[in-house]
Image (cartoon, rainbow, N blue to C red):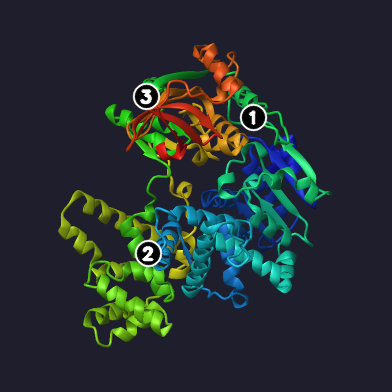
Amino acid sequence: MGLLEELNEEQIKAVKHLGGPALILAGAGSGKTRVITYRIVYLVEQKGISPDRILAVTFTNKAADEMKERLYDLVSTNLKSLWIGTFHSMCARILREYRETTPFSRNFVIYDEQDQGNLIKRIMNNLDMREKEFPPYYIKRTISNLKNRLIDEHEFEPMGSKQIRIKEVYIEYQRKLLDSDAMDFDDLLFNTYRLLNSNEGVRRELDRHFKHKLVDEYQDTNHAQYMILKKLSMKNRDLFVVGDDDQSIYGFRGADISNILDFEEDFPDCKIYRLERNYRSTQRILRAASSVVKHNKERKGKTLWTLENEGGKLTLFNGYDENSEARNMVKFLKEELLNHKRSDIMIAYRTNAQSRAIEDELLKEGIEYNIVGGLRFYQRKEIKDLLSYIQFISNKRDSVSLSRILNTPRRGIGRTRRDRIESYAEEKRITLWEAIKEIAREDTIISDFVDLISSLENIERVDELLEAIIDKTGYIRLLDEEDTVEADSRIENILELLSVVKTFTLKEEKYSPVEYLAEVGLKTDIDEWKRDDSVSLMTLHNTKGLEFPVVFIAGLSEEVLPHYRSIKDGTIEEERRLFYVGLTRSKEKVYLSYYRKRGIGWGSSRMLIPSRFLFELSSEDVDGLDWISKEEREEVLSGESVRDEWVEHPIWGKGKVLKIIDGDKLLISFDGMIKKIKREFFT
């Protein structure tokens, strides 16, 4: 078959898998996406499987779009009925199609992180909870973790007084979501599982319908996703999962590496295929990456190999602090620009805060860069405002969107009027919109807002609706009157949104606001990233699935990479996998760097030692390892060190760190006065 000529022997075996569960252990750069794509082609073209009987789940919307484009090039059959997308988009579609069996409408809205945060803050305010004592992001993360473990607000058993208050928020949060006909991302999974678990008819129908289920990046599935797949594979057991246990890096989001490690226990009749040939990196890069990840115990084990050349050594350099590390990095980067384009280069780091020093140096040298994971297009104020209009017009129960647009642009509906509306809605037990319509009978300003919404609600095409919103609210006109650089930038963003919406209606042949919102609501950072002629800066988590000729990995110091929380929590293996992912993004050259002094707030600093991961590399593959002193090497291997560390406290002044206790507490001498303080206080 000519189609399979592009594949190697092991890839062909996987593509032609006869049936039943299959686990494809696909190493970095081994062509796993190609295997899934060609498996779909093989099923449709050779086995005569109807596209609508195939479910293909990808990790990102971007990956789904790229797979679709590749499939359209390879297959003559019409593939529009193929189910392909992320877990969240698949679940959203199921919940809309089976809406009669849920308490939600077909037009339910999806709240993003900003919407969630705003709703949680409102609830906390109503419950007299102080943000200092209960940080909203922590409550949001706790609720998310519970949902991913399929624990609802009533099943949650709190431990201690703080968790009792969090449970109060969780209960009220879910009530408000239901009242607003809204779900957050985690609800899409949780509610789909509930549907499959409680309605055997729906579960059987979907199980029978999806004859073949293919899942990419299986190592990053969480418990809820795992349970959904099990529910969909009780009869039709053609479950084809592709993943790499060495690239499981999303434990902080609830990903469970045991899903891939225990696949054989869950499906004893499964067939395993190993894709070990790498098509991306040089032999030396693969050797270095393998020498690091082999120190992990939680792994299946594989041996990556390549026909690429040996390649040059990895380069290790350092700086006294973050600023000098960045200066040295940019020197090497400028040398690489003699032979590479800016777009060939990626700088990766453990946390977003590390980009500041690097950005400063790039700006000084006039080197263009872009940050993946910065403020997303759809999170910008002007875009969020306009989409909130569309969202509310599509779903009048959406109180979060209504609260956002009520006085945007300003129309005289300030705090006093808002409080009156909210109190009236609570008193009468009606929605905010119903309260607004009743109050409008005696308030001309609110009446004008009701008239505005009424004039927009019968426009059926999303592109025409957006144009009407901009026109009737005067949004662009008001920005134009500001006559500032920032206002001009916002106008450009709005024009870009108009272009995106118009393209959506033409390309997808979908016109309704609900269909557009369903697409936009599931966008992520990496979905919006477009490679241009600039150096790419991103966290190591965002590098997943990408490749660059030249890769810089910054901040290889203990407590940075690995992060100090992982040292405290015992999750070093995931940090090692994160480093492995960064190394295997490179096609030709890798630069590694660390620094010795780190600012930690209040004018304080602490001395760091090189990352333990550096000592898992060989000097045969890395230039610069010999610079690390024997003493530093021994400190890393023996455990934590306090060395010459000083901190600055806002009350007690400068203090010397005497000892680190339990990984997260510092014993400090403030001019002879000994205090034990959590390390987090100084970070």
**Amino acid residing under circle 3:** Val
Q: Quadrant of the N terminus?
A: top right
Furthest-front residue in view? 672
- The residue pinned by badge 3 equals 330
Task: Say which element carries label 1.
Answer: helix
Q: Which residue is denoted by mark 1 in the rendering?
A: 293
Q: In this view of the protein, which residue sits in the foreground, 583 or 338?
A: 583
505 with respect to 4 (left or right)? left
**Between discs 2 and 1, the one toward the N terminus:** 1
Label 3 residue SS: helix
User: Counting other residues with Cα less than 10 Å from the Cα at mark 2, is it few (<14), some (14-19), or many (20 or more)?
Assistant: many
Report the Cα–Cα distance between label 3 and label 2.
40 Å
Quadrant housing the C terminus: top left
Q: Where in the figure is residue 321, as x and y percent of width and height?
A: 38, 24
Q: Which residue is drawn at the image coordinates 37% and 64% (left, top)?
A: 387
Give the CA distance from mark 2 to mark 1.
44 Å
Give the amino acid at mark 1.
Val
Q: Is residue 568 above or below residue 656?
A: below
Q: Position of residue 117 (x, y in %)?
A: 42, 59
Q: Label 3 crowding class (10 Å Cα cut-off): few <14, some 14-19, many 20+?
A: some
Q: CA distance from mark 1 to mark 3?
A: 28 Å
Question: On the image, numbered disc 2 is attached to which residue?
Answer: 387
Regarding residue 516, the answer to whether it shows in the image is yes
Q: Is residue 542 left or right of residue 456?
A: right
